[in-house]
Amino acid sequence: MEYQAINKNEIPDFDQSRDYFITNIVGDCMNAPGSPAKVGTGGRVLCHTIDKFDFLRDWEQYQGRAVVFQLAASHPLARGGACMIKEFCRIDWGLFVVLQYHNPRKTLLSIGTDEFNRIAIVDKVLAEGRADHAAPNQQNKQRNNPPG
């Protein structure tokens, strides 16, 4: 996660006690019209960290919000501390965090509460990043299936 000075007037519901930061996005799983944070590769989001256990205890207030979380180092997708962005849906049985991504289609996934170390709530999309997430796929399709 990258820390950078920001103007508090740009932060919705600014709270001086929160730990705010800006992070870059890699991937296009949230780059869709129905996403709570429409952002893709090259985008940037403003977030604030929240204690993992406070999040798990009071999770209802975060439903439908975009979250950024850091997978535990032992997780196969951790990629050296990389963070992931998804829409938070719910906690199941106190053991699983249910998340949703929006691209290429809405899909639910769950991870164990022990599979991530840190979590942050997305407050604002600062830059959407890649404008057209479908462009590379369309180009490949046209190359492989030329007209005529």
Image: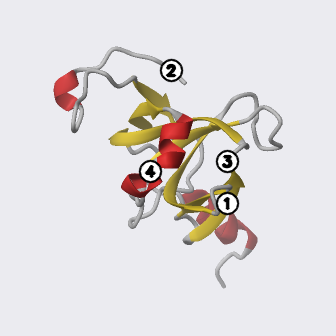
Q: What mark, if any, has residue 2 been given in the picture?
A: 2
Above or below, 47 relative to 96 = above
Q: Which residue is mark 3?
A: 113
Residue 146, position in %: x, y?
69, 75
The residue sitting at 75% across, 37% down in the picture is: 78
Q: Is residue 24 left or right of residue 45?
A: right
Which amino acid type is marked by label 4? Answer: Ala
Q: Which residue is mark 4?
A: 66
Reading the chain from its start, which is encountered first: label 4 or label 1? Answer: 4
Q: Sort mark 4 into few (<14), some (14-19) or many (20+) by Cα contacts within 10 Å.
A: many
Q: Is residue 113 left or right of residue 64?
A: right
Which amino acid type is marked by label 2? Answer: Glu
- The reply to whether dot 4 and dot 3 touch (C-beta < 8 Å) is no
The residue sitting at 50% across, 56% down in the picture is: 88
Task: Give 41 or 64, whichever is nearer the viewer.
Answer: 64
Q: Secondary structure at mark 2?
A: loop
Q: CA distance from mark 2 to mark 3?
A: 24 Å
Q: Nearer the viewer, mark 4 or mark 3?
A: 3
Q: What mark, if any, has residue 110 been given in the picture?
A: 1
Above or below, 56 relative to 44 = below
Q: Secondary structure at mark 1?
A: strand
Q: How is the image coloured?
A: secondary structure
